[in-house]
Amino acid sequence: MSFEAQFVDSNYAQLIQRVTSVMPIADELKNKGMLHPETYSEIKAEQTNQGKMRRLFEALNSGGDRVKSDFYYALRNHENYLFKDLAPCTQETEASCNQDTEKDATWKTRKIRCSYLKKKEY
């Protein structure tokens, strides 16, 4: 299983509750041929973002790692703050920790956690 698919699977509940840009993400996946038009219509027909995300997850689970990987990158593009909040400490997210957002307490906590995890690896 890819790192991206693991991220999506391990954050299932948080993603359902917190993603607000469901349709832009679904649009991106549809344009890449990752969502069948009927599935896209079902997602669009849902009344709440949580309902839309549940429908989207059905498609992600049936599509496998490739679709989950594309969802991961779409999430990063459309829900950057949520992505950074949920993302594990990696080279990619550590770079974000060092940007101007250090004033934010969440990022200070994240930077400390990243430093701690790096020390544990040695």
Image (cartoon, rainbow, N blue to C red):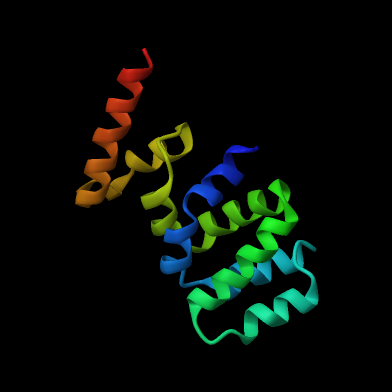
In the rendered image of this protein, does residue 77 appear above or below residue 35? Answer: above
Q: Residue at x 32, y 38 (%)?
A: 98
| Number of residue marks | 0
**Residue 84 versus residue 53: which sits nearer the camera?**
53
Residue 106 position in % (x across, y down): 25, 50
In the image, is 35 to the left or to the right of 95?
right
Q: Say which quadrant the N terminus sits in.
A: top right
Res. 88 image quadrant: top left
Residue 14 is situated, as x and y percent measured from the top left of the image, at: 42, 59
- In the displayed structure, 101 sits above or below 1; it is below
Q: Residue at x 52, y 46 (%)?
A: 7
Q: Nearer the viewer, residue 51 or 106?
A: 51
Report the residue at 60% width, 67% height from top: 25
From the image, which quarter does the C terminus lie in? top left
Q: Residue furthest top?
A: 122
Q: Residue at x 44, y 53 (%)?
A: 83
Depth check: give the residue in front, 12 or 105: 12
2 above or below 64?
A: above
Q: Position of residue 67 (x, y in %)?
A: 70, 54
